[in-house]
Image (tube, helix red, strand yellow):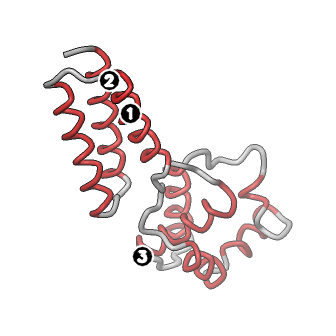
Amino acid sequence: MRKAEAVLIDAADEVLYRAKKAGGSCNELIALSRLTAYAQGVASRSISMKTIHVVFFLALTGAAQASPFPNGNAETGKRLVVETKCEACHARKAGGDGTSLYTRPERKVTSATKLAAQVAFCNNALNAGLFPDDEEHISAFLNKVYYKFKD
């Protein structure tokens, strides 16, 4: 197996792993599984570097488009933020309108994982009674409006 083919297989496997971890939809996982199978088939025969580069580019493009909160609905999250008075609590703690916690330069949330953890922490600390899917909706809203994390 040539080095480029091994790199292609590794890239396709990584994209599939990330999609599964992020809770990708059934169609996304099927497409990525096919990409992985294609990459493994490539290794068994000689192909041009151009073909390898095209497939590798498609794999990377798919990874870049993955949402860190695939089951979250930003509109539902926005409604939940208002209903649970998240920003009123933030305003009491940090002043202003409460949104400054999301935009301050020294913010604690620096990744999608930390965002989800912070939303869960607030839910538990305040006994807000949100379900995990509610937390994901809130995370999707905050990510869309303030954070813009890709994965």
Residue 48's place in the image compared with 16, above or below, is: above
Determine which of the numbered discs, if any, sits on residue 7 in the image: 2
| Tag 3 residue | 131
Q: Residue 107, image x and y in percent?
A: 70, 48
Residue type at mark 2? Answer: Val
Q: Residue 23, image x and y in percent?
A: 34, 59
| Residue 26 quadrant | bottom left
Local SS, label 1 = helix
Which residue is drawn at the image coordinates 61% and 45% (left, top)?
110
Residue type at mark 1? Answer: Phe
Local SS, label 2 = helix
Q: Given this view, does label 1 or label 3 mark the residue nearer the observer?
A: 1
CB contact under 8 Å: marks 3 and 2: no
Local SS, label 3 = loop
Q: Residue 109, image x and y in percent?
A: 62, 49
Q: Could you tell me how far apart the alpha carbons at marks 2 and 1 are, in whole angstroms?
A: 9 Å
Viewer-nearest residue: 26 or 84: 26
Q: Given this view, does label 2 or label 1 mark the residue nearer the observer?
A: 1
Which residue is drawn at the image coordinates 50% and 58% (left, top)?
116
Q: Which residue is farthest right? A: 96
Which residue is drawn at the image coordinates 19% and 16% (left, top)?
1
Q: Which residue is farthest bottom? A: 83
Determine which of the numbered discs, if any, sits on residue 149 in the image: none
In the displayed structure image, the side of residue 71 where residue 118 appears, left or right: right
Q: Which residue is farthest top? A: 2
In the displayed structure image, the side of residue 47 where residue 103 appears, left or right: right
